[in-house]
Amino acid sequence: MTFREKVQDLLDAGLAEKPNVFLIDLTITDGFKIIVTLDGDLGVTLQDCIDISRAIEHNLDREEQDFSLEVASGGLAPLQNIRQYRKNIGRNLKVKTANDTIEAELTAVTDEFITLSWEAREPKKVGKGKETVQKTQEIPFSEIKEAIVTITF
């Protein structure tokens, strides 16, 4: 079993103990620095990071392979998997596609696409002036280049 496989197995076992926490990324550098990035349906606590760190570190032998370990939450990094999109329904996203950038509320997520909703000012169909209209757009995951949760203060 390779070092990476051993780390992945320990990580999977640690995550099995915490069903609300999920893996965003696992990186192991050439210098055997293990970087684990987590997210959670209810967020990630410091205790979650400690528990996952212990699940890995306490089951690896430094005599066999010296390593360093970093376990952290994803923070405000771009969304990478469907589970992250689902946890952010109701929040505003900035979504970049090949042709467009849309900042709007995430209202729905399926296995194939997300749905964004926003209000826009458009010319009235009859008469002068503008009116506020509700817009929605479905964007397939295959077209999303980057999606970030926007924070407003």
Image (tube, rainbow, N blue to C red):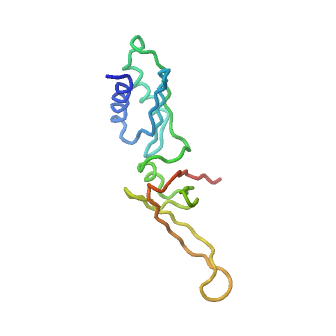
Residue 36 locus on image (x, y percent):
46, 32
Is 137 drawn above or below residue 48 in the view shown? below
Is 115 drawn above or below residue 77 in the view shown? below
Q: Which quarter shows the N terminus?
A: top left
**Residue at left offset 65%, top offset 89%:** 127
**Residue placed farthest to the top in the image?**
63
**Residue at left offset 42%, top offset 14%:** 62
**Residue at left offset 35%, top offset 23%:** 2
**Residue placed farthest to the bottom in the image?**
127
Is 79 drawn above or below residue 106 in the view shown? above
Residue placed most toward the observer, 150 or 17: 150
**Residue placed farthest to the left in the image?**
1
Residue 40 locus on image (x, y percent):
44, 43
- Residue 3: image quadrant is top left
**Residue placed farthest to the front in the image?**
98
In this figure, what is the number of numbered marks?
0
23 left or right of 131? Answer: left
**Residue at left offset 37%, top offset 37%:** 18
Is 55 drawn above or below residue 15 in the view shown? above
Residue 91 locus on image (x, y percent):
52, 56
Residue 57 locus on image (x, y percent):
42, 21
Residue placed most toward the observer, 69 or 29: 29
